[in-house]
Amino acid sequence: MTQAALFVTAYGRPAAEVLCERVAAAKADDPLAAVTVLVPTNYVGVSIRRLLATGALGPVTTRGAGVAGITLLTVYRLAELLGAAGLAAAGRRPVSTPLVGAAVRQVLSDAPGIFAPVVGHPSTEQALVHAHRELSELRPASLAVLERQGRRTREVVRIHRAVRRRLEADWYTEADLMAAARRAVARGSTMLDDLGTIIVYMPEDLSLPAAGLIRAVAAATTVEVVAALTGVIQADADVVRTLRRLGLRPPAVPGTAPPVVHEVVSVSDAEEEVRSAVERVV
């Protein structure tokens, strides 16, 4: 199975420069060659698009700067492009938090189990909605393991499964979308030809379904990963876990020096924290 190529750098400008280098390598002499950059958030996408467009990071082709042929997407949006059409054809729509909440209330009304004393408390519903979203990422075997961890965990898994049964015929979760996208890739989706080289830029904490999609795409087309590390084990834990989920081996020594604290500011509350930070920037 083909794996993505890994490029490790530091956060900030160094990461942006490595991305520019990889885009330039993918485009070579063709300014219109397709390159897709998977960004962690849309805000990162806007920022990096502006940097690439200005040429501040250097040219992206041998013919100059610009962002022609460069598409910036989140992993979720990539999954939509690949798999949403198939789910829509089956009559399924993306699920929403209020809808999951309503399903949780129905399940608790029918069989509250150990949650009977707190069935009407808003926090109960909120916690179970959150648990449902997290458990949706797990495979059946993992859910079976959780069920054996105690009565409370078993009850949470029971409610998760009951909610899923109520919704899955007409609605799909993010994990369902990722699975549909993987199936589309396995069938040889022509969409991949339009995306060109795919560069995963600064992945932070990819879910198992999202990582599985990227691994499937890497088996079908060229995928590169530009990962940023701080050099601090605790701070890099999410990134390292994500790289392993992608089937990549993080470097034993990140090669980036840990940041050094020059000043500690103690403030009374969040608002004062913002004011203090703005004063130092301005």
Image: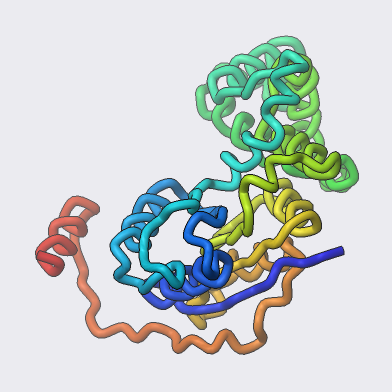
Whole-percent x and y of residue 164? Answer: 76, 24
Q: Residue at x 73, y 49 (%)?
A: 213
Q: Residue at x 45, y 88 (%)?
A: 257
| Quarter of the image that includes the C terminus | bottom left
Q: Quadrant of residue 127?
A: top right
For this rendering, which residue is in front, 279 or 66?
A: 66
Above or below residue 30? Residue 260 is below
Quarter of the N terminus within the rendering? bottom right
Number of numbered discs overlaid on the protein picture: 0
Pick whichever, 220 or 125, lies toward us. 220
Residue 143 showing in the rendered view = no
Side (left or right) of 83 relative to 199: right
Residue 265 vs residue 11, the one in the foreground: 11
- In this orientation, which residue lies closer to the viewer: 126 or 111? 126
Q: How does the figure colour the protein chain or chains?
A: rainbow
Q: In x, y percent, where is residue 163?
A: 73, 22
Residue 29 position, x and y percent, is 52, 68
Residue 44 location (% of width, % of height): 41, 54
Residue at 51%, 80% in the rendered image: 232
Answer yes or no: is residue 43 visible.
Answer: yes
> Which residue is painted at 21% across and 69% down in the image?
266
